[in-house]
Amino acid sequence: MPKRILSGVVTSNANEQTVTVSVERRFTHPVLKKTIRKSKKYRAHDEKNAFNVGDQVRIRECAPKSKTKRWEVIAE
């Protein structure tokens, strides 16, 4: 089964080897026919602490690294 890849913006890098990435998706509301933006935060593994707040990154699904981390940052 292929691993999902998402792109988003780093919102936090306070923890060691971890970044929080905010991923935004857009879709049309089924009744109102209005475009809606929803965002979700993912915690991703950053091995070298290379990414800072505001960086555009891509994250990939992986085996669980900790209680909350199930994603890893792909080097841009």
Image (cartoon, grey):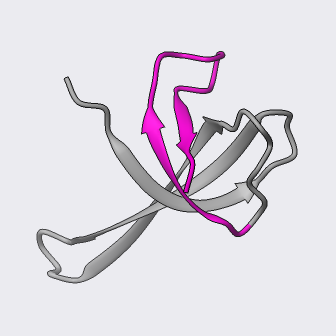
**Image: 74 above or below 45:** below
Quarter of the image holding residue 61?
A: top left
- Please name the residue shown 52% across and 33% down the image: 71
Q: Which residues are magenta?
A: 54-76
Task: Say which quadrant the N terminus sits in.
Answer: top left
User: Looking at the picture, how far across and down is residue 24, in whole percent?
Assistant: 44, 64
- Please name the residue shown 60% across and 27% down the image: 69
- Please name the residue shown 22% across and 83% down the image: 34
Quarter of the image holding residue 28?
A: bottom left
User: Looking at the picture, how far across and down is residue 57, in whole percent?
Assistant: 56, 58
**Image: 27 above or below 42:** below
Between 36 and 15, the one lying in front of the other is 15
> Please, which residue is most extreme toward the bottom here?
34
Between 36 and 9, the one lying in front of the other is 9
Residue 42 relative to residue 52: left or right: left
**Image: 60 above or below 32:** above
**Image: 44 above or below 40:** above
Residue 1 relative to residue 43: left or right: left
User: Looking at the picture, how far across and down is residue 17, in whole percent?
Assistant: 78, 33
Residue 4 relative to residue 46: left or right: left
- Please name the residue shown 44% across and 38% down the image: 60
Between 38 and 75, the one lying in front of the other is 75
